[in-house]
Image (cartoon, rainbow, N blue to C red):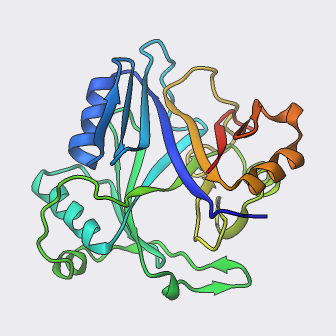
Amino acid sequence: MSDKPLAMGRVALTVHDLDRVGDFYQRIVGLHRLRTDGSQLDLGVGDTVLLELRRDPAAQRRSPRDAGLFHTAFLLPSRTDLGAWARHAAATRIPVVGASDHGVSEAIYLADPEGNGVEIYADRPASTWKWHEGMVEMSSDPLDIADLLDRTGAGTWRGFPAGATVGHVHLQVGAIPPAEAFHGGQLGFDITCRYPGGTFYAADGYHHHLATNIWNSRGAAARAEVSTGLADVEIRVGPARLAALLQRVGADRAGVAMPDRVSLRDPWGTAITLVAA
């Protein structure tokens, strides 16, 4: 069914303060400004948009316990790049909120000025990932920062390098069973890992493209129609996968159904758009 490997596209966030949030993603995270019209700012690498910021000062402020975004995870091409970002974070005293060794990857966590979670990570070689009956082992051990810095040289951080992408998006949901029914059933992702209160989903042998958890949001209701935080997640798929999705869910259940894209909402109102690559 999958004629092209699945890949994450751009993530769109609704924000109150476009200038402040935009500065964070450029100066702190390292994304590059691509274009802006005063109400929307597109950030990314080269000519590829990875993050779309939409200004809406009237939007309801999202609570940390609401369904929606847990974090956007930006994937750097190499461990060397992650080390360079870590040195940048240390030199500029970026307020990091966590750092973990997940076995399949090494990750550093922070939050933007409006509370949207951010992960900066690099994958370990796929040959080292441990799989058992279709499930991948992912730990949450402390990241060895000293080793990361010692073994990645002294390269200068100059912003996101070519090849950086959105690696995965982690969502907050109200309950796990309906989340699995949506992402695993309707969207057709494989379930690759389960933690207490969390499930991870992927395609094409990756450890996860999407994840859902109830760690802060157990019992959350559907989101307000217009609120800050996650506005849309774009996923790029091959035409055959897109056609199969549309056949599976039915055109009447897709919010927008066109030959090159299908838009759906999860049970909590979070928008997912699949686009033909």
Can you give x and y, in whole percent of width and height, for residue 183 in the image? 73, 53
Q: State the residue at coordinates (55%, 38%).
A: 65
Can you give x and y, in whole percent of width and height, for residue 80 in the image? 25, 73
Q: In front here: 276 or 267?
A: 276
State whether residue 214 is above or below residue 16. Answer: below
Snapshot quadrant of residue 124: bottom left
Snapshot quadrant of residue 96: bottom left
Snapshot quadrant of residue 198: bottom right
Q: Is residue 110 left or right of residue 1?
A: left
Judge whether residue 151 can be spotted in this image.
yes
Q: State the residue at coordinates (44%, 82%).
A: 125
State whether residue 187 is above or below residue 82. Answer: above
State whether residue 71 is above or below residue 190. Answer: above
Q: State the residue at coordinates (37%, 61%).
A: 163
Judge whether residue 213 can be spotted in this image.
no
Q: Is residue 165 left or right of residue 96?
A: right
Q: In front here: 197 or 59?
A: 59
Q: How many marks?
A: 0
Q: In front here: 63 or 54?
A: 54
Can you give x and y, in whole percent of width and height, for residue 241 in the image? 76, 56
Q: Is residue 191 left or right of residue 138?
A: right
Quarter of the rendering occupied by the N terminus: bottom right
Can you give x and y, in whole percent of width and height, for residue 265 in the image? 72, 36
